[in-house]
């Protein structure tokens, strides 16, 4: 049985791993060269703590306020585009407490499964990437955010997650670089982190060693369909130029018994070629990675008021944030990058004394070298904050696996496992009904 996977990010490669393990003949079609997709620049978190969907009470009001602040962590580019309007309407309708309560258990189960599978990749010796189970700390400076995070902690404990609530003195002892204004924090001890760049370099090599065919620079341009099924995916090599007579470059086909759509933020356009609709928008995020000759941070953390995440590895530190909902483009909005960097010393003032951070945060240097210093990628943001994992509505052998927003790496291995189980008609490792693409 032949499976064609569209997309070579962590979701697509994880699906390839488990399908190949189950005996499928797997081909991965990736529009890039597998050197810099959205999985490369993320924070490397494996986060059972992230069981609250993006669509939650208060997000609409907060988002509107943030839109008028150029340095805020959230922005929606206004547009009358039909897909954005439809996505926005569905997102608003889902942003309620009932949706959060209904989604928490499925998200936590998938996140825990994915962390377990990723840890097995590391411990088995199949791949070697920097992997640490230090948990993740959520720091807050205001009473309102403290109240919200303590409620999240209460829910997490009720679901069996390991959580410790820390007072001001305890967080200072745990992370001496914190400023006194930090009121406290919540330590989610089930969380782990890894170096995603190492994982994303080794996983394709492992797959090709096991017989998976990975076609790089392959742009899917259509499908051959028969009786409600895809018989083949049609693609062209993205680095080929159109012929001089005006005809497009040669089109190639990948015969398929199963097609897995895991193209991230590009998934809606490809789904449309198959006659399917996925309510999903690209959410641009930024990250910056610096060398850390002095280890100023001991634990990965999220600065809650600023929505800024920090991940320390052995020799480097990554800082990331923002969610810009809009079109796919190559613009870098300088005020938002500046807002990320300005947030860090408000929690960790010692970073102002670190030469590597000071150079990164220097306004003139950043403006001049922004393309070299700032990474950006597009997260696939679903209309209710839950991923889409399951068979399409109209195409019986099209399996959709996208919409993971900012926690694609956290859910990658688990999603790949679910895809393989669904493809084989097996019971899934966790209840995946909440992720059905046809839930709207």
Image (cartoon, rainbow, N blue to C red):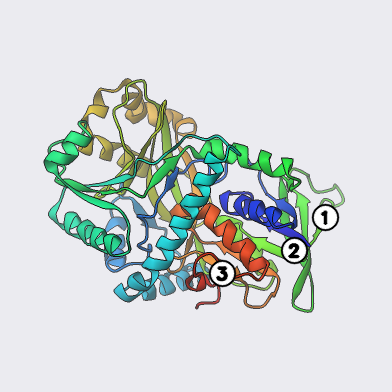
Element class at badge 3? loop
Q: Residue at x 22, y 38 (%)?
A: 347
Residue at the right extreme? Answer: 245
Asked whether the viewer can see residue 269, the reply is no
Is residue 101 or residue 320 the one in the foreground?
A: 101
Comes first in the chain, label 3 or label 1: 1
Comes first in the chain, label 2 or label 1: 2
Q: Which mark is residue 291?
A: none
Q: Residues within 10 Å of mark 3 (few under 14, many from 20)?
A: many
Which residue is labeled 2 in the image? 222
Which residue is labeled 1 in the image? 251
Is residue 87 or residue 6 the one in the foreground?
A: 6
Give the percent coordinates (x, y) of residue 275: 67, 73
Q: Residues within 10 Å of mark 2 (few under 14, many from 20)?
A: some
Whether the residues at callouts 3 and 1 have beta carbons within 8 Å, the answer is no
Give the percent coordinates (x, y) of residue 162: 30, 53
Comes first in the chain, label 3 or label 2: 2
How far apart marks 3 and 1 lie (CA) works out to 25 Å
How far apart marks 3 and 2 lie (CA) works out to 16 Å
Q: Which mark is residue 278?
A: 3
Element class at badge 1? loop
């Amino acid at each position: 049985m032949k499976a064609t996977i569209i997309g070579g990010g962590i979701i697509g490669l994880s699906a390839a791993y488990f399908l190949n393990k189950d005996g499928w003949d797997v081909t991965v079609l990736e529009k890039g060269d597998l050197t810099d997709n959205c999985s490369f620049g993320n924070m490397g978190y494996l986060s059972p703590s992230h069981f609250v969907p993006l669509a939650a009470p208060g997000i609409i009001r907060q988002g509107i306020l943030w839109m008028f602040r150029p340095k805020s962590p959230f922005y929606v580019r206004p547009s009358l585009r039909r897909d954005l309007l439809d996505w926005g309407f569905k997102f608003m309708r889902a942003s309620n407490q009932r949706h959060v309560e209904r989604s928490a258990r499925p998200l936590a189960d998938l996140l825990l499964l994915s962390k377990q599978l990723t840890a097995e990749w590391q411990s088995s010796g199949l791949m070697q990437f920097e992997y640490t189970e230090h948990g993740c700390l959520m720091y807050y400076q205001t009473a309102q955010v403290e109240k919200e995070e303590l409620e999240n902690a209460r829910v997490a404990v009720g679901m069996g997650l390991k959580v410790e609530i820390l007072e001001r003195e305890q967080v200072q002892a745990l992370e001496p670089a914190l400023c006194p204004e930090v009121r406290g924090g919540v330590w989610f001890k089930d969380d782990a982190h890894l170096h995603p760049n190492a994982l994303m370099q080794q996983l394709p090599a492992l797959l090709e060693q096991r017989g998976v065919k990975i076609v790089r620079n392959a742009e899917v341009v259509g499908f051959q369909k028969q009786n409600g099924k895809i018989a083949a995916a049609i693609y062209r090599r993205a680095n080929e130029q159109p012929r001089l007579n005006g005809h497009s470059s040669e089109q190639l086909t990948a015969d398929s018994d199963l097609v897995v759509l895991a193209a991230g933020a590009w998934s809606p356009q490809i789904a449309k070629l198959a006659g399917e609709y996925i309510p999903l928008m690209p959410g641009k995020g930024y990250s910056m990675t610096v060398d850390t000759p002095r280890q100023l941070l001991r634990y990965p953390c999220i600065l809650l008021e600023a929505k800024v995440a920090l991940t320390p590895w052995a020799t480097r530190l990554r800082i990331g944030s923002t969610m810009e909902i809009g079109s796919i483009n190559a613009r870098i909005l300088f005020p938002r990058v500046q807002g990320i960097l300005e947030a860090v010393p408000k929690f960790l003032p010692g970073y102002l004394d670190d030469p590597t951070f000071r150079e990164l945060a220097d306004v003139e240097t950043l403006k001049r070298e922004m393309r070299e210093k700032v990474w950006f990628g597009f997260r696939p943001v679903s209309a209710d904050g839950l991923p889409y994992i399951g068979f399409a509505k109209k195409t019986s052998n099209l399996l959709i696996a996208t919409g993971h927003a900012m926690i694609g790496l956290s859910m990658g291995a688990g999603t790949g496992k679910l895809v393989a189980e669904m493809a084989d008609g097996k019971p899934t490792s966790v209840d995946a009904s909440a992720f059905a693409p046809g839930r709207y």
